[in-house]
Image (spheres, helix red, strand yellow):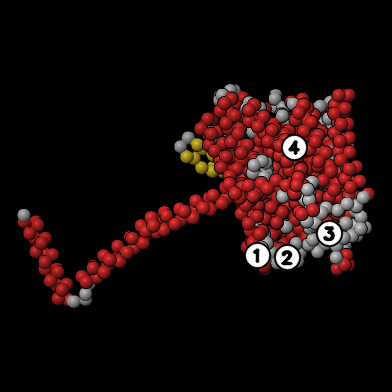
Amino acid sequence: MIQFAWLVPLLPLLGFLILSWGGKKLSKGIVPIIGAGSILASFAIALLIFLQLGDEPVQVKVFEWFAAGKLNVDFAFMIDQLSVIFLLIITGIGFLIHVYSAGYMHDDEGFTRFFSYLNLFVFFMLLLVMGNNFLIMFVGWEGVGLCSYLLIGFWYKNNEYNNAAKKAFIMNRIGDLGFLLGILMIYVTFGTLDYTKVFEMVKANAANKDMLNVIGLLLFIGACGKSAQIPLYTWLPDAMAGPTPVSALIHAATMVTSGIYMISRAAVIFVNAPVASEVIAIVGLLTALFAATIGLFQNDIKKVLAYSTVSQLGYMFLGLGVGAYTGAVFHVTTHAFFKALLFLGAGSVIHAMSGEQDIRKMGGLKKALPITHLTFLIATIAISGIPPFSGFFSKDEILAHAYEHNKLYWFLGIIGSMLTAFYMFRLYFLTFGGSFRGTADQKHHLHESPKSMTIPLIVLAVLSVVGGVMGIPNGHMHVLHYFLKPGFGPAEAWISNPHHFNMHELFLMSIAVAAAGVAIYIAYMIYRKNNILPVDSEDDMTAPQRVIYNKYYVDELYDAIIRKPFDKLSDLAYRFFEIPVVDGIVNGVGNAAKQIGGIVKYAQSGSIGLYLFSMVVAIILFIVTKLY
C-alpha cells in the first residue's frame, strides 16, 4: 500500500476538480459526499500506510519532474514516521471539518465553491508534508498560501474580508522569500535539494556551522510567516474573517503548523546550527507570551482563539529551539485536537447566536447548547494544561526540555501557561456561565447545532481527553518518541530522549499545574462568581488595558512605518517616474508612429500614375547602383 501513497494527495485533488467543474450542477446533497468522501478515502489509505510502515523511509517516485544543468528533481514522496503523523492529522481532522462544514455552510450560496477550496487546500498540504525534497515542499507551501487567501476572503463581497485575505497573502510572501532563499542556499551548498542527500552531507560535516546557521535562519523566516511568529504574526488574527471551519482547518490544525513540520523535517540542519536554534527558541517564547497577553482582553470569541493559536505555536517553536523535536510534534498533534475543537465549538456558538461573536453578548449558553458546552469545556481544560487531558502532556514535555536548556525559558513558559489558562477560562465563563446577555430574538432562537456539527465535536473531545497517552513521559511508554525517532533521520542521535517520571520532574509538573490552577481560580472569581463583565468602551479601560486591547498597536505601527511610507513612495514614483518617463516613452513611441504614418500615408494616395512613376524611378536607381 505504501507504493500507492500518491493516491493520498490525488483523491482530494480529484475532489477539487469534480466540485469545480460540476459547479451549480451538483446538488447540495452530493457536494459534501464528494468533498468529505475524498478526504475520508485519503485518511483510510494514510492509516493503512501507518500500519505497514517500517523503520526505514520509503521513496515513492511518481515521475521525473525536470532536469536543469546539474539539478535533477523527481516528483517523489518520502513516506516515513514524521510524514505519516502529519498525513493522519491533515486527513483525519480535515475529514471531521468537512463533515462539520456540511451543516455550518449549508445555507451559503457558495457551498460548492467552499468545499472545492477545502479539497484544494488539503491537496497542497499533503503535498507539503509528503515531498521528498525541498522543492516539492515549496510547491505545497505556496499552494496552501493561495488556498488560505481564497478561504479567508471567501465572503468576498465584504471588503474587510478581502483586505484580511490580502494581508495574509502578502505577509506570507515575506516569509516565503526567506524560505526560498534558504532553499537556494541549500542547493548552492550541497548541490541537491533531496532530503536524504542533504541530511547525509550535513551529518558528514560537508558544510560549516556558519553556513548552516544562515540556512537555518532563512528557513525560520519562512516558518515565521506561515506559522505566525513575531514579527509576521498579525495576519492570523485578521484571518478569522473566513468561515469558522476555515479557522479550524487552516489556522488551528494544519497550515500554521507547516513551519513546525519544515523545521522538524530539517532537524539535522538545526541541531548543527546552534545560533539558529537559539533564535527559534527566543522568538517562540516571546511570541507565546506576547500573544497570550493580547488574548487577555479580546472580546471576539474567534479573536481570542486566534491569539491562543499564535501563543501555542510559540510553544512549539520553543520546543524546537531547545531540541524537543518530539515534544513539538506531540504538541502539534494534541493542539490539532483541542484547538480544532475550540474553533468548531465557537462556530457552534456563533451558529446558535445568529452570527454574534462578541462574548459580552453571550452568557448562559450551558443549558441551550449542552453538547457544545461540554466539548468546549474539555478543550478548554486540555489547552490549559490540566492532567490527564492531552495538552498537559505535550506542554509539559516542552517545558521540561526548556528547563534543561535554560531555567529562564522554563519560568517564562510557566507564566505563558498561566495566561493561557486565564484567558481560556475567561472565554468559557463569559460564553457559557451566568445569565444570557443577548437579545430576546437571539434567546428565542438558541438551539444546539445539528448532528453534522456535534458529532465532529464529540470525536475531537474524545481525542482531546485521551490523546496524551501517546506521550506519557515514562521510558518506553513514550510511544510517540520511539515512533518518530527514525523519522528524524541522521538527526536522531541528537534528538533528546523522553523524560522519565522522577521526583524532580514531578515537582516541575506540579508547579505548572498549580500555576494553571491559580489562573483558573482567578478567572472564576472575576468572571463567574462576581460576574464582572469586560467594559464596553475603551474610555473605561486603564491605559495598560487599552494598549493590550488594541494589540499593542502593532498593526498601527506597521501601518505608520511600512505601509504609509511605501504608499507615499509609490505616489512619488507614479507622479515623477511613471507618468513622465514610462508613460512618456510609451506615448512618445505611439506619437512618433502616428507622425511617421501621417507623412508616409501620402505615398499611398491610390494614384496609378504615381505608382508607375515610383516604379520607374526605383528601376532606374537599381540599374545605376548596379552599374556604378
User: Badge 1 is on which residue?
Assistant: 157
User: Badge 4 is on which residue?
Assistant: 315
Measure the alpha-carbon separation of dots 3 and 2. Answer: 25 Å
Residue found at x 64% / y 33%: 266
CA neighbours of label 1 inside 10 A, class few (<14), some (14 to 19), many (20+): few
- Residue 257's place in the image compared with 408, above or below, is below
The amino acid type of the residue labelled 4 equals: Tyr
Q: Are marks 3 and 4 in contact (CB under 8 Å)?
A: no
Measure the alpha-carbon separation of dots 1 and 3. Answer: 26 Å
Which image quarter holds the N terminus? top right
Measure the alpha-carbon separation of dots 4 and 1. Answer: 36 Å
Query: Can the viewer see residue 16?
Result: no
Q: Are marks 3 and 2 in contact (CB under 8 Å)?
A: no
Q: Earlier in the sequence, mark 4 or mark 1?
A: 1
In-front residue for pair 355/448: 355
Q: Which mark is residue 108?
A: 2
Q: Position of residue 614 (x, y in %)?
A: 14, 69
> Which secondary structure, mark 4?
helix
Q: Is residue 627 left or right of residue 457?
A: left
- Residue 72's place in the image compared with 445, above or below, is above
The amino acid type of the residue labelled 3 equals: Lys
Q: Which mark is residue 361?
A: 3
